[in-house]
Amino acid sequence: MRKPKSSADVLQVRRHQPTRLEGFVDAAFAFSLTLVVISIGHIPESVPEMLQALRGIPAFAVCFLLIARMWNSHRNWGRYYAIEDTTGLVLSLLLVFLVMLYVYPLRLLFSLLFAGASAGWMGDHDFALHTLDELRAAYIVYGVGFAAIALVFVLLYGHALRLRDSLALAADEVLATRMHMTMWLGTGSVAMLSALLAAFLPAEDGATTLVIALPGNVYLLIFVALTTVKRYYMRRIVALQRADPA
């Protein structure tokens, strides 16, 4: 038996054709990407304006990748579990709602991030923060929004676990489902940690650059959490498959 490297090697595809709900979710995610583009502003009317607009590409690229990751996660959830009950419907619609709300703080924060990292060369000059309280609010809104989206994914995978008998999930599929659930739980926890750190930032006269950047830098923990969780569960899956090759 080939050693599995990811959950895609473990989870069985139970639905090969998209449902009307998945089609709606796909369209909603595409519309969310459109909102990112529209929020850039007006169409450039000159070469200097075009060059200025191109400086926002890095921020747009990150927004695109994050939204695409969320879309792909929901797509895989639908393919692997083929759940079509009321709970799955409500959670999917809630996800769409939150993603649409999440678009603007997402673009704002990454525009400011790239602008700060490039001394103002990259990013969107339509956005500007003038006080520490404004930065605090941006971190909190982004963190709470990201955590809420992660919580929906936790609930989606948790719902699949509750239906594991009716879905006839194999033992290794149960572990893979728990892995995805735990990965989103870790992602949401880091987002809430960032929001809490932002809420307790010191006053402007006592805040250093390192302290101000802490709520943003803490998101690097997501990569550590995801890697750790994946390694842990994949080892358990491999051990389970070796113990029961059938």
Image (tube, rainbow, N blue to C red):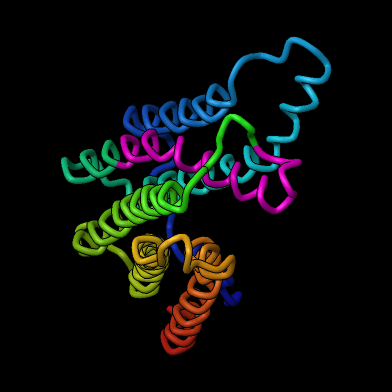
> In this picture, which residue range is highlighted in magenta?
95-123
The answer to which of 199 and 57 lies nearer the viewer is: 199
Rendering coords of residue 94 (x, y %): 26, 40
The answer to which of 59 and 178 lies nearer the viewer is: 59
Name the residue at the top extreme.
Answer: 45
Q: Check the image and report above or below for 203 versus 109.
A: below
Q: Quadrant of residue 93?
A: top left
Q: Quadrant of residue 40?
A: top right
Q: Is residue 114 magenta?
A: yes
Rendering coords of residue 188 (x, y %): 37, 62
The answer to which of 22 and 145 lies nearer the viewer is: 145
Q: Is residue 126 magenta?
A: no
Q: Check the image and report above or below for 55 versus 227.
A: above
Q: Residue at coordinates 37% horizontally, 73% vertically from top-left?
A: 175
Rendering coords of residue 212 (x, y %): 52, 63
Q: Residue at coordinates 48% horizontally, 74% vertically from top-left?
A: 225
Q: Check the image and report above or below for 240 versus 85.
A: below
Circle count: 0
Q: Could one spot residue 83 in this view of the protein?
A: yes
- Quadrant containing the N terminus is bottom right
Rendering coords of residue 83 (x, y %): 27, 46
Q: Quadrant of residue 199?
A: bottom left
Q: Residue at coordinates 58% horizontally, 29% vertically from top-left?
A: 126
Q: Residue at coordinates 37% horizontally, 70% vertically from top-left?
A: 182
- Quadrant containing the C terminus is bottom left
